[in-house]
Every structure is written in C-alpha cells, then in structure tokens.
Amino acid sequence: MNNASSLPVYEDYDVLDKRDTPSWDDATRTVIDNRIGISDEPAWCTPEQWRTLRALCAVIIPQADDERAVPLAALVDRKIAKGKSDGYRHARLPALQDAWRIGLAALNDESMHRHRAAFSDLAERERIGLVQALEHGTLSRDTWQGMPPQLFFTQRVLHDICTTFYSHPSSWSAIGFGGPANPRGYVRMSFNRRDPWEARETGTAHGGQTMREKQRAR
C-alpha cells in the first residue's frame, strides 16, 4: 500500500489551463466557473452551523491556507442549500438538510457537554477526538434525535465532504486529473500513455522521482 510520501506530485499542473482549449465546451466552462467563483460564506448555515461545519471540514480534509485551498465548507453548504439528494439515502437517516441540521447541532452539543466549549473553539486534538467518537458511534446525547451518529458520519460527513472536495479544480490539479474532456475527449487510453495536455508527474511527495513519469505521448 502506498503511503503519502510515495504519491506522485504534479507541482506545475493547473487544470484551468485547459479552460479555453477544445477539452472544455461552454457548458463545462460555466459549471466550473461557478464552482471556482463561489464565495466563502454560507447560503444555508446559520452562523453557529457555519462555524461548526468549517471546523468539521478542517478535521476531515486539512488544507494549507493558500490560494489553491478548496472553499470546502462553502461548497458543502451549497449542496445542503439546494437540498438535492444523491438519489438514495439510508433508511435510518433523515433527508439531507435535516440530517445536517441535526448533526451539526448535536456535534456542537457533544462538544459543549465534553469540553464546555463550542466545537469550532476546540483545539485540533480535541476536535479530532470528538470526530473519532462520531466515527465509532459512541456519541449519545439526546440532540441526535434518534439519528445514528455513526451513520451520519459515514453517509453524510465523509460522503458529502470528500466528494465535494474532489469536485473542485484545485483538487484535480493536485492529483493530476484533467477533469472533463468534452468535446475533445481522451485519446491515448492505454497504460503508461498520456495525451500531451495531461498532467506530467514531477516527482513524489518526499522529493524523489517517480518510477514512471510518462514522458512521452505516442
């Protein structure tokens, strides 16, 4: 199994360089422009929910505070605001908005009960400990209103936060993913072959060279 230090790095790659190429049509550009133009503020969350959601996102996917950081909480908030489901949900979970409303309130209540401080005000170690308790299903305050905490973690927290993170072009650039390819498409589909406009591995996270850098496009 690979560890983080052996993963490939694409330090010079920016998927947005494809914006005005045949890889993206107008519809794709509009969707992506809206995604990267989102303001880092809530559309659905109350101020307290927003602080809790931001802190929760930072535990699930920590990010460097730079210009390529994904506005993760804002993107999750927009998904909740739309109330658009994934087409399925676990029978023991309420609808999307209700699940997040209950879950954020209950997580904050658990924090107040255990640490006498809001979740967003906790130190990183305390936040992680509370999220681990959420993952293991050991939280049990009445504020969960019968919603299983462990299911909320797996079906909503992990699902919504992680899929949202990897829907953003900054994440695509980081993992060397070229995103949509419409109308041009991908041409060289065989193993260890790449189209000229695809990402080129520049090394690994610990500074070494990758075993295969896919230097040639055939």
Image (cartoon, rainbow, N blue to C red):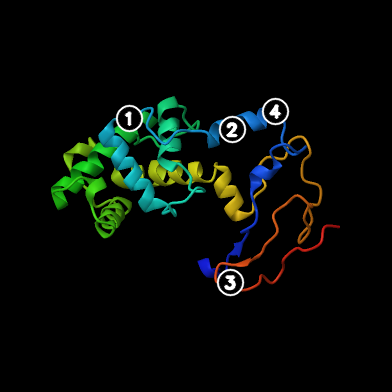
Image location of residue 154, percent across then percent down = 39, 47
Say which residue label 2 marks: 33
Determine the residue positioned at 63% across, 59% down.
10
Q: Quadrant of the N terminus?
A: bottom right
Q: Give whichever of 168, 109 is nearer the camera.
A: 168
Image location of residue 101, percent across then percent down = 30, 32
User: Can I make out residue 82 in this image?
Assistant: yes
- In the image, 207: left or right of 92? right
Say which residue label 3 marks: 207
Amino acid type at circle 3 is: Gly
Determine the residue positioned at 51% across, 66% down.
4
Residue extending farthest front: 67
Circle 2: element type: helix
Determine the residue positioned at 72% across, 66% down.
213
Q: Which mark is residue 26?
A: 4
- In the image, 201: left or right of 130? right
Amino acid type at circle 2 is: Asp
